[in-house]
Image: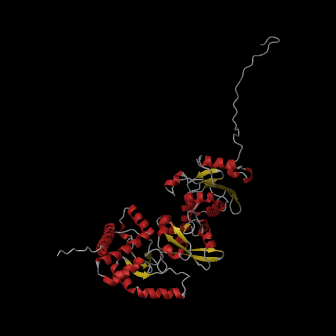
């Protein structure tokens, strides 16, 4: 009992309550309205989500899919090639699109979300119409996925077009240098979208110098009456430009596109034609036999027929001397600086593609026996106005069975092959022919010098005054 006025002693009894405190009030960036998100927030999210702290995204797009399905997405075009794609452009472990279902992260390695040729595009997709237990098998059969896929591709192409149309042309040059090969793969693999990808392609050409040109620019600048887009393939820009075939077209003021990589050649074969201002233009390989140009009139055809008859003997000789190396020998009036060129038949394989196929076969552990020879199925075109061809014609008429004439003929073929991008099969034999020709030239020059010395000494003897002889009586 407590005395009057005394207060009872109190003690503290702990009481535990269970509850939750909301630590993060902000929504995920892709769920917010695009108008409420600042540019800095997009950049920061990109760097954080994709571990790209040193990369500034080149372009981004934030959109919502409504209608048949509902989904929200953000897509980015990186400012540089992601490190994991620098080793393997289709690295399976590279995470590019992060898939969420009802804001729950599912996976970042679903290849079905984006086609292979857009492997470099990064982003987030959040759908409410996919099940949470989504699997690869479910995705492959899902109509929802097909709709999302089409929309992602369309938005990606829109971003690329925006970069291409930017006033600062250096931005698209940077994009093309980093990701151009992916667009080429898109032409080959994505038949549905290749017509939309084609205007985004860039090439070097005979008129562009060190700058890129597009198919639209090519057609804007083409000569009047031109109905075809001409291209040549080669080992790099310089290799393609060196081809004698380019002379055929540049001599007539045609622009020639350079396919500088094996991938370019596969890509252009998949494209075949290009639509511009409601007209279709065929893409034509200028290195194929029988190149048909609109500039050839009746007079030029008549002149060619006369030259063909005049040099018929030389053509027959070359076909015999080069039997097994060429299909045939034909005359051309389109070459200017080169004596000859090697071109492929309609279904022949270019030298660049032959090298590529050979390298692939060897890399796969096989031998190159199944790959066509370096100059197999080629057609030798000779230029009758060139001094070398005219010299060979005189040599054939004078003594076609001489070793010098045969060496000269094969050397013409070798040089045509080298300048056309082919590899010399027997370099030792080639070197022997060159040294033989040099020896003949040196011997002729030495004989000419000796003749000149003898002639000069004779002239001096004639010019010396006669001495008077004194006769003693």
Q: Is residue 22 left or right of residue 396?
A: right
Q: Position of residue 406 (x, y in %)?
A: 32, 77
Q: Which quarter of the rendered picture does the C terminus lie within?
A: bottom left
Q: Position of residue 368 (x, y in %)?
A: 36, 67
Q: Is residue 27 left or right of residue 401?
A: right
Please name whichever residue, 225 or 275, is drawn nearer the observer in this view of the structure: 225
Residue 405 position by quadrant: bottom left
Q: Which quarter of the rendered picture does the N terminus lie within?
A: top right
Q: Residue at x 47, y 85 (%)?
A: 304
Query: Which residue in the rendered view is the most extreme toward the right?
Result: 5
Q: Position of residue 468 (x, y in %)?
A: 25, 74
Residue 101 position (above or below residue 190): above
Please name whichever residue, 117 or 125, is drawn nearer the observer in this view of the structure: 117
Please name whichever residue, 254 or 371, is drawn nearer the observer in this view of the structure: 254
Residue 436 position by quadrant: bottom left
Query: Which residue in the rendered view is the most extreme toward the top?
Result: 3
């Amino acid at each position: 009992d407590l005395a009057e006025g005394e207060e009872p002693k109190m003690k503290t009894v702990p009481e535990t309550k269970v509850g939750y405190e909301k630590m993060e009030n902000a929504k995920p960036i892709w769920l917010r309205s695009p108008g409420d998100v600042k540019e800095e927030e997009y950049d920061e999210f990109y760097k954080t989500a994709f571990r790209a702290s040193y990369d500034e995204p080149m372009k981004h797009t934030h959109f919502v899919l409504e209608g048949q399905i509902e989904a929200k997405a953000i897509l980015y075009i990186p400012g540089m090639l992601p490190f994991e794609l620098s080793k393997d452009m289709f690295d399976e472990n590279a995470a590019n699109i992060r898939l969420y279902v009802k804001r729950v992260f599912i996976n970042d390695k679903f290849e079905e979300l984006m086609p292979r040729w857009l492997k470099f595009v990064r982003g987030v997709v959040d759908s409410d119409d996919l099940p949470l237990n989504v699997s690869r098998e479910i995705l492959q059969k899902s109509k929802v996925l097909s709709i999302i896929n089409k929309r992602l591709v369309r938005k990606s192409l829109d971003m690329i077009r925006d970069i291409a149309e930017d006033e600062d042309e250096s931005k698209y040059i940077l994009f093309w240098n980093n990701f151009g090969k992916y667009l080429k793969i898109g032409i080959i693999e994505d038949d549905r979208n290749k017509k939309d990808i084609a205007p985004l392609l860039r090439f070097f050409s005979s008129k562009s110098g060190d700058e890129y040109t597009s198919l639209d620019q090519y057609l804007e600048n083409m000569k009047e009456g031109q109905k075809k887009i001409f291209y040549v393939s080669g080992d790099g820009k310089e290799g393609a430009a060196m081809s004698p075939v380019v002379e055929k077209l540049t001599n007539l003021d045609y622009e020639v596109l350079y396919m500088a990589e094996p991938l370019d050649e596969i890509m252009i074969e998949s494209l075949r034609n290009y639509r511009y201002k409601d007209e279709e233009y065929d893409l034509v390989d200028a290195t194929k036999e029988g190149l048909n140009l609109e500039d050839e009139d009746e007079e030029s055809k008549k002149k060619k027929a006369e030259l063909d008859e005049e040099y018929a003997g030389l053509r027959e000789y070359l076909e015999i001397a080069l039997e097994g190396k060429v299909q045939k020998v034909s005359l051309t009036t389109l070459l200017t600086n080169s004596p000859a060129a090697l071109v492929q038949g309609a279904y022949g394989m270019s030298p660049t593609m032959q090298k590529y196929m050979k390298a692939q076969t060897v890399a796969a552990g096989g031998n190159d026996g199944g790959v066509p020879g370096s100059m197999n199925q080629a057609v030798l075109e000779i230029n009758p106005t060139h001094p070398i061809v005219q010299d060979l014609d005189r040599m054939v008429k004078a003594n076609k069975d001489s070793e010098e004439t045969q060496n000269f003929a094969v050397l013409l073929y070798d040089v045509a092959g080298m300048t056309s991008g082919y590899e010399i099969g027997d370099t030792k034999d080639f070197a022997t022919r060159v040294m033989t020709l040099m020896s003949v030239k040196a011997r002729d020059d030495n004989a000419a010098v000796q003749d000149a010395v003898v002639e000069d000494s004779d002239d001096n003897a004639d010019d010396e005054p006669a001495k008077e002889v004194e006769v003693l009586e």
